[in-house]
Amino acid sequence: MIKEKKIQTLKNAVLNSYSQIFFSENKIFALLLIIVSFLDFWAGIYGLISVLTANITAYILGYDKTLIKKGAYGFNALLTGLGTGIIFQPSIELTVIVIFGALLTFFVTVALQGILAKYALPYLSIPFLLGIWAIILATKDFTALGLSERNIYTYNELYALGGKTLINIYEKFENINGFESLKIYFLSLGAVFFQNNILAGIIIASGLLYFSRIAFSLSLIGFYAAYLFYGLTGADFSALAYTFIGFNYILTSVAAGAYFVIPSERSYLWTLLLLPVTVIITASLEHVFSVWQISIYSLPFNIAVLLFIYALKLRVRKNSKLTDTFVRQETPEKSLYLFHTASEEFKNKNYFPIGLPVKGDWSISQAHDGKYTHKDKWRHAWDFVITDEKKLQYKNKGDYLEDYYCFDKPVFAPAAGIIAEVADGIPDNNIGDVNVEQNWGNSIVIKHGEYLYSQISHLKEGSIKVRKGDFVKKGDLLANVGNSGYSPYPHLHFQIQATPYIGSETLDYPLHNYIIRKNGKTELVTFGKPEEGETTAPASSEKILENALHLVPGKNLSVNLKSSEKNITEEWKINKDIWNRTFITDKEDSKAWFYENDSGLYFSNFTGNKKSLLFIIFKALYNTNKSFYKGTEITSSIRPDLFFGKLILTLQDFAAPFCIFLKAEFKMTYTEKDDDFIPEFVKTESTISKTIFGKVKEKEHFTVIFHKSGETEIKFDNNILSIKPLKKTILNQTAK
């Protein structure tokens, strides 16, 4: 069993070492690239030797198996082996040089991984450059090596590989008339694997198209943008067909336009702007490196992409139209779809959850950019009051503090933290009076994290229960509402800020898990910013939902599907990967990725068999809050590539950076609870709607019943799928 795992790890490492050159882990694409590498047999052999050397070394030395399987330690060694195998005649001596060259490239890879990781930058193909340059310069003293003559006798090599048939295919592609620029495009693609023929480029282009429509389109855009710039400046672009540098523009375009950023109109625009810069870098470096009589290879690509990525990371204001790929998927398309459908959930996941500082129903008398005091640097704040059915804040005539419904009401910690500052001893004002000098009044500042604080102000004199340095949990009693400071009538001021001082500038930060009551209906908000005039209250969790949605890594789930025709039982595991991301996995190794917090369970991604029972769970419980308010609806978007066929999805892939016309929408409605005080079950209805250009084409319906016993039932299409937690647990599970 252990031996099989080692073999599987090595197999994945070898395949991905080829496809990683194009930022891919697609196995079919990898096989096509292996075929391309063997169009020059000895180059292919030495490339494979280098890949095996680097990956076996990484495994023996105990490096991260996940990175080994991804080909992270092998692709630079592969390029070094291919380049060396192309330049020199095959021999025992060259084999030794290739092995040690692969070791050198591997160690440079590891070193650069550690150095550049501090700046969150990739090492790209810099290890290959250092490795191939070291070998080329060193071999000037290695007289036992001879330069390759194989490109002189190309037909002999092709005949040895595939006989007359391969020669005929080669001639057919080489003798294509017209489209000179397209021929150079194919030659540039082939040059990535040191192949100087059109056939190699066509195979790579076909594999690139199969792997990613976005990457393929960007390869053309990158090439032709550089081609036009060469024409504009009077440079000779045909030279790129035989100098092994034309691919720089293709790789730069794919990396900067789709891999390290989310593909979009803006990323395509910046790719077009970056390519002339890459041309300038290329032209200048050629003159510099001609002194040493060595090729610049992929150096322009590395410089241009690293400069671009680093510049993006140093931005003060992030732009949603040009954003880093925060969760990288198998293809640029999947990264894009995930960004559009889950960006709000992922953005919210990064927020530390800060709730309301009150309990029960409260009205917002002033919200962000309020017309009275929430202005300029202090505009992101809320004022809370309590109103009656007539929207009045007071009883009688409102002449006294005690007439106001919110006066002396308890105030609670909105989240866990440490008391950073306390101000007390400021008298409460009479109605209509204000304290201009001590305008914040009695206040508390709580530290929730680095550069994250909340401030609660206008508290009642002498009511504060905490002192500076105290630790508080969410919901702990802090004080009571008063009328101190610049407050003509009792209310509670609440704001989020980055510094620990009373009166600090405010942050535009959402509040967590609350409800809004309007027109007799209740709206549940996971993260949001209450608006002026809204009636809001903290959302209360339902115990049944808390138990059912509490999925702990190490726990197993028993799953049973019953219908009139079948009865299927499975056991699933809840695991986590090396990045601490949690997922449910079944026997087929399908995975439903999720995260859970105090407010609910949220599925973020699915990989594997879409006909599996696990995919049913993913669809039925995609976004489930732990609170129950009858009639409440939750809506979310889901990645369209999980629901549509390949043909129409291919068209969508090409258009995706500019327009997404395929959509899948999730809606959950909270419909029934058998008892308000001691319920035995909670029922919800889930729907997945598939739309094309805004028109609904298909719907899937699920009825979900959460039982007090911990069992969850999902009813769909005359099937009943039940999920029960098992008592046994398996600790320290990680993704393989």
Image (cartoon, grey):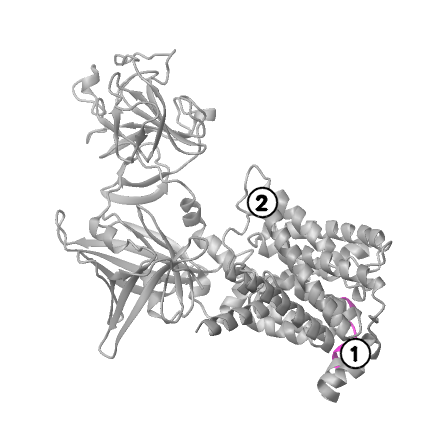
Q: Read off the residue under disc 2.
A: 118
Mark positioned earlier in the residue sequence (1 or 2): 2
Toward the viewer: 736 or 496?
736
Q: Secondary structure at mark 2?
A: loop
Q: Secondary structure at mark 1?
A: loop
* Span of residues in magenta: 172-182
Q: Looking at the image, can residue 187 be seen?
A: no
Q: Is residue 267 left or right of residue 506?
A: right
Q: Position of residue 505 (x, y in %)?
A: 45, 25
Q: Looking at the image, can residue 88 be seen?
A: yes
User: Depth-wise, is mark 1 or mark 2 nearer the camera?
Assistant: 2
Toward the viewer: 385 or 85?
85
Report if residue 181 lies within the magenta region: yes
Q: Residue 175: which numbered mark, if any?
A: 1
The Cα–Cα distance between marks 1 and 2, rounded to whole angstroms, is 50 Å
Toward the viewer: 706 or 463?
463
Q: In percent of the image, x 73 and y 53: which residue is there?
A: 300
Q: Is residue 228 left or right of residue 660?
A: right
Q: Position of residue 232 (x, y in %)?
A: 81, 54
Q: Residue 592: which numbered mark, if any?
A: none
Q: Is residue 662 left or right of residue 13?
A: left
Q: Is residue 619 left or right of residue 297?
A: left
Q: Quadrant of the C terminus?
A: bottom left
Q: Position of residue 274 (x, y in %)?
A: 69, 50
The three-letter code of the residue at mark 1 reads: Asn
Packing grade of label 2 (10 A; few <14, some 14-19, many >=20) is: few
Q: Quadrant of the N terminus?
A: bottom left
| Quarter where residue 707 is shown | bottom left
